Amino acid sequence: MSYSWTPEGEPRGQTSPLAALAALFAVCTGVSIYVVALGGAVPVGDDRAYADSTLHRVSGELSDGGVVDPSTLDSARSAAPAGRQLNVTLTAGDRRWATGPRPPTGTRTDAASRTTSVRLGPGSVAPGRLRVEVWR
């Protein structure tokens, strides 16, 4: 350890550059080990959730001023993620509209839904629910 002197004549300790480099190396090694361990804990694969982002795209595609017109439901199929199948269902009261194939039985699907306003006719709007199901 080297010393420097203050104007008052008292010694003041300083860290040698070698000790500072050793401390920096120890911190970087610790962070690297943490990142490697965390990376092994994250599942690898294509099990991402597609439904929430797809629902957002479908809702934007179908709604005009926050109101969904059931006659435009077929245009929502273009919002399907690449390599995925999409089913869009719109319900209002006891009425139901759907587009896209139904998921096969036993297939794991990712689904999301949100409330929306549904245009039932000229000047007639009712509360409803927009639901999407996405699968491979």
Image: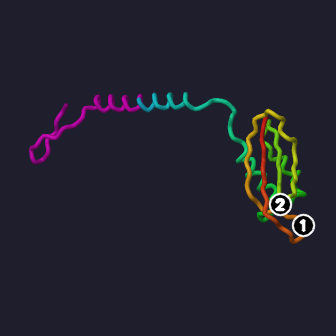
Residue at which label 1 appears: 121
Which quadrant of the figure has residue 83? top right
Residue type at mark 2: give it: Gly
Mark with earlier residue (2, 1): 2
Tell me if residue 61 is in the magenta stretch: no
| 5 left or right of 134 in image | left
Determine whether 99 is above or below 109 in the image.
Answer: below
Residue at which label 2 appears: 93
- Quarter of the N terminus within the rendering: top left
Q: Secondary structure at mark 1?
A: strand
- Quarter of the C terminus within the rendering: top right
Tell me if residue 24 is in the magenta stretch: yes
- Name the residue rendered at 87%, 71% in the picture: 123
- The magenta region covers 1-29
Residue at the extreme front of the image, as rendered: 94
Q: Secondary structure at mark 2?
A: loop
Residue 18: assigned label: none
Q: Nearer the viewer, residue 25 or 124?
A: 124
Between tags 2 and 1, which lies in front? Answer: 2
Q: Are the residues at dot 2 and dot 1 in contact (C-beta closer than 8 Å)?
A: no
Residue type at mark 1: give it: Gly
